[in-house]
Image: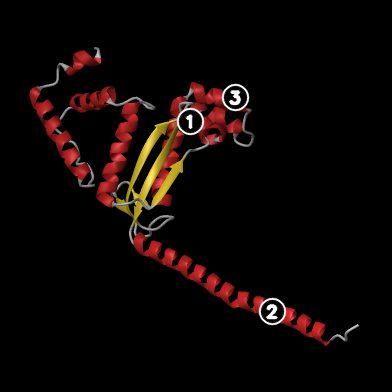
């Protein structure tokens, strides 16, 4: 049965509950909260209807509409959290990754390439024939970045107490884009707790360092000038003491 025909079989009650669930998800997302579990009474067909609808209506990568959508998300994040503290770009080198071959070829065929990466032509052919393998590799790298570099627990929707590479994150945003060779990369903005204090300390340290260098220059410069003046005076005195011819 075609999917469109199957959707006509969804009951009004299932559709109503699915709509209420989608509205609740949007409200939770605006507050930075986790999405609730879908109602058990709602059929999987009703849930997949909204998923397919979202996919069908989403913007195409590299289009003006996609760029506008990304800008709106960035502007909204800055309006809510202030100036971002960290800008991070992640672009995995999928053409040289063994994991891509593992996802594309399977364990048995990928094992012979574990110690010797194939030639570039073969690597790019594997990528072009198995684009999902590159996407799975990208998702794996992205999960590691979120957990270890940013320091954010995706399951609980909040930062780890230990923080990440840059500190304890208050909020973060990612924009995933498609590259010309149909693989993915992402741009990230990160907001940190206490970053304003760290920024003040760094700026203060730089300013103190500049003032110290200026003071050293002021102290050292007159001494050099005094030495030059003394040499000139000494030569004048010696010239005046010479006997007249």
Residue to which mark 2 is pinned: 229
Tell me: 83 left or right of 121.
left
Residue to which mark 3 is pinned: 122
Judging depth in this view, the residue of 37 and 35 nearest the camera is 35
Element type where label 3 sits in the image: helix
Residue at x 58%, y 72% (from the top left corner)? 217
Verify CB contact (< 8 Å) between mark 3 and mark 1.
Answer: no
CA neighbours of label 2 inside 10 A, class few (<14), some (14 to 19), many (20+): few
Q: Position of residue 2 (x, y in %)?
A: 25, 12
Q: Position of residue 213 (x, y in %)?
A: 55, 70
Judging depth in this view, the residue of 210 and 42 nearest the camera is 210
Tell me: 216 left or right of 84.
right
Marks 2 and 3 sit apart, C-alpha to C-alpha, by: 75 Å
Residue to which mark 1 is pinned: 103
Instruction: Say which label, 1 or 2, has the lower sequence index.
Output: 1
Does 90 appear above or below 181?
below
Q: Is residue 39 visible?
A: no
Instruction: Say which label, 2 or 3, has the lower sequence index.
Output: 3
Does 35 appear above or below 180?
below
Marks 3 and 1 sit apart, C-alpha to C-alpha, by: 15 Å
Q: Is residue 146 visible?
A: yes
Instruction: Say which label, 3 or 1, has the lower sequence index.
Output: 1
Q: Position of residue 125 (x, y in %)?
A: 55, 22
Residue at x 66%, y 80% (from the top left corner)? 226
Residue at x 35%, y 61% (from the top left corner)? 196
CA neighbours of label 3 inside 10 A, class few (<14), some (14 to 19), many (20+): few
Residue at x 19%, y 43% (from the top left corner)? 28
The quadrant where residue 75 appears: top left
Tell me: 234 left or right of 83.
right
Element type where label 1 sits in the image: helix
Q: Which tag is nearer the camera, tag 3 or tag 1?
A: 3
């Amino acid at each position: 049965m075609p999917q469109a025909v199957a959707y006509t079989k969804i009951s009004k009650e299932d559709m109503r509950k699915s709509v209420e669930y989608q509205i609740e998800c949007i409200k939770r997302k605006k507050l930075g909260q986790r999405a609730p579990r879908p109602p058990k009474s709602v059929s999987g067909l009703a849930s997949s209807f909204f998923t397919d609808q979202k996919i069908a209506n989403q913007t195409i990568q590299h289009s003006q509409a996609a760029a506008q959508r990304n800008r709106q998300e960035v502007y909204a994040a800055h309006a809510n959290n202030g100036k971002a503290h960290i800008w991070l770009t992640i672009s995995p080198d999928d053409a040289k990754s063994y994991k891509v071959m593992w996802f594309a070829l399977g364990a048995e065929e990928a094992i012979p390439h574990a110690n010797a990466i194939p030639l570039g032509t073969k690597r790019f052919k594997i990528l072009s024939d198995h684009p999902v393998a590159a996407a799975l590799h990208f998702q794996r790298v992205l999960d590691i970045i979120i957990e270890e570099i940013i320091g954010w627990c995706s399951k609980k929707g909040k930062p780890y107490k230990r923080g990440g590479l840059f500190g304890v994150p208050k909020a973060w945003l990612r924009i995933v884009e498609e590259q010309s060779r149909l693989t993915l990369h992402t741009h990230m903005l990160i907001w940190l707790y206490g970053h304003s204090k760290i920024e003040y300390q760094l700026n203060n340290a730089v300013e103190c360092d500049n003032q110290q260098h200026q003071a050293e220059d002021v102290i050292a410069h007159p001494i050099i000038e005094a030495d030059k003046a003394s040499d000139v005076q000494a030569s004048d005195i010696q010239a005046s003491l010479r006997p007249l011819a």
